[in-house]
Image (cartoon, rainbow, N blue to C red):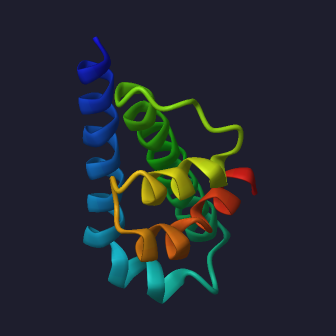
Amino acid sequence: MMEEVLFSKLQRLKEQTKYLVDNKPRLLRTLKSSIETKKIVERSVYLCSEIVLDIADLIIIKNGYPKPSTYADSISKLGEYGIIPKEFSNKFIYIAGLRNF
């Protein structure tokens, strides 16, 4: 069951990032002048951050570690537990701020 949820989240993340990558030239060209583009980009980035943080929690729980108390702690713990490189987790921790934004 958890594997299905994790797979589903990974698929959604892949779809969201593909959309952003595929549309990057257009989005960058109109970002400053279009409220619609701003909303699309904000929503897409928000969804990516939300999905990443859900995945972090699922991985931590699946490995039997205690559930972190904050979103930032989820990313930090992935580095501490050696699931992702510690240096990357220290840089990536700011994704939690996007989720809270």
Query: Residue 20 location, x and y as percent?
Result: 36, 66
Question: Image height check: is 3 above or below 31?
Answer: above
Which quadrant holds residue 33? bottom right
Q: For the point 52% across and 45% down, which residue is it?
A: 53
Query: Residue 92 location, x and y as percent?
Result: 51, 69
Q: Residue furthest right?
A: 101
Q: For the point 44% across and 77% down, which residue is it?
A: 87
Query: Residue 89 location, x and y as percent?
Result: 48, 67
Judging depth in this view, the residue of 13 and 68 nearest the camera is 68
Q: Residue furthest top?
A: 1
Q: For the point 46% across and 53% down, which residue is it?
A: 48
Relative placement, left or right, of 86 versus 68 is left
Question: Image height check: is 74 above or below 97?
Answer: above
Relative placement, left or right, of 8 versus 46 is left
Relative placement, left or right, of 10 versus 44 is left
Query: Residue 14 location, x and y as percent?
Result: 26, 51
Q: For the point 46% across and 88% down, which residue is it?
A: 29
Relative placement, left or right, of 94 versus 13 is right
Question: Image height check: is 99 above or below 23?
Answer: above
All told, the count of numbered labels is: 0
Q: Quadrant of the N terminus?
A: top left
Q: Quadrant of the C terminus?
A: bottom right
